[in-house]
Image (tube, grey):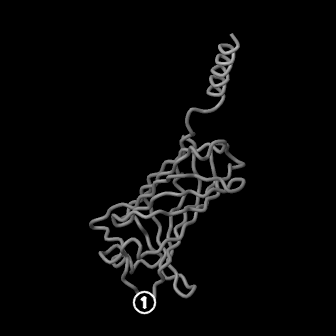
Amino acid sequence: MNLRHGTLAKYMGAFALCCVLPLHAAEWTLTPNSQVTFGIKSVGLSIVEGRFNKVQSNLKFDPEIPHKGSAHLLLDVDSISFSNPSLKGLILGSEYFDAAEFKQVKFVSKQIEPVAYAKYMIRGDLTIRGITKPVIFDTTLTPSPQNPKVLDVQSLATIKRSDFGMRKALGGVGEQVLIQLKGQWRLE
């Protein structure tokens, strides 16, 4: 009889735990004022800065269970605006983004790892020009004091452009590209 009672107690405990914990993380999307940008530097000077103006986004996230979360971004290459508009044709051309063939940049997370309060390492796969490489975004997700359905976000990653087939050098343009997401995730 002790065995049955112990087994019943174990199942009741598991049932109670399931009722308390959410079955899945909340779903968030980026607000329209959020920005996904990139910058390439050479000798400490900013050479090229760009912003993706069309972004599809999805974040499944609960700060109580961040390891069960996921992030997905789909960026429209033709929507990029540049700090120096005269470079648009070159950078969207075949030597760099090759926008005629590769219409989107994609990021799909594999793991959200908490490192400190409101700080996370989001590991995932970044695809540019049809080439997929692992990337880590150092991310801060802070609940907005004005709205409990909003998370302020700042996320940074550095990649090598040649890893994605962008090999041509342009007047000393650096190899390192800083990608930044800044804005807010809104609870759907």
Instruction: Name the spot of residue 135 as percent of width and height, x first.
Output: 50, 63
Q: Residue at x 47, y 67 (%)?
A: 51
User: Which quadrant is the C terminus positioned in?
Assistant: top right
Q: In the figure, residue 88 lies in which quadrant? A: bottom left
Q: In the figure, residue 77 lies in which quadrant? A: bottom left
Above or below residue 147? Residue 41 is: below
| Side (left or right) of 159 relative to 130 | right
Instruction: Name the spot of residue 119 as percent of width and height, x first.
Output: 67, 56
Q: Residue at x 50, y 77 (%)?
A: 176
Mark 1: secondary structure: loop
Q: Residue at x 67, y 45 (%)?
A: 147
- Figure label count: 1
Q: In the figure, residue 3 lies in which quadrant? A: top right
| Side (left or right) of 116 relative to 41 | right
Instruction: Name the spot of residue 78 as percent of width and height, x first.
Output: 35, 65
Instruction: Name the spot of residue 163 as percent of width and height, x first.
Output: 41, 73
Mark 1 surroundings within 10 Å by alpha-carbon count, few (fewer than 14), some (14 through 19), many (20 or more): few
Residue type beneath disc 1: Gly
Q: Residue furthest left?
A: 101
Q: Residue furthest top?
A: 1
Of residue 85 and residue 71, the one placed in the foreground of this image is 71
Of residue 182 and residue 73, the one placed in the foreground of this image is 73
Above or below residue 1? Residue 106 is: below
Of residue 7 and residue 37, the one placed in the foreground of this image is 7
Of residue 109 and residue 35, the one placed in the foreground of this image is 109
User: Which quadrant is the N terminus positioned in?
Assistant: top right
**Which residue has dot 1 on it?**
171
| Side (left or right) of 6 relative to 176 | right
Above or below residue 171? Residue 127 is: above
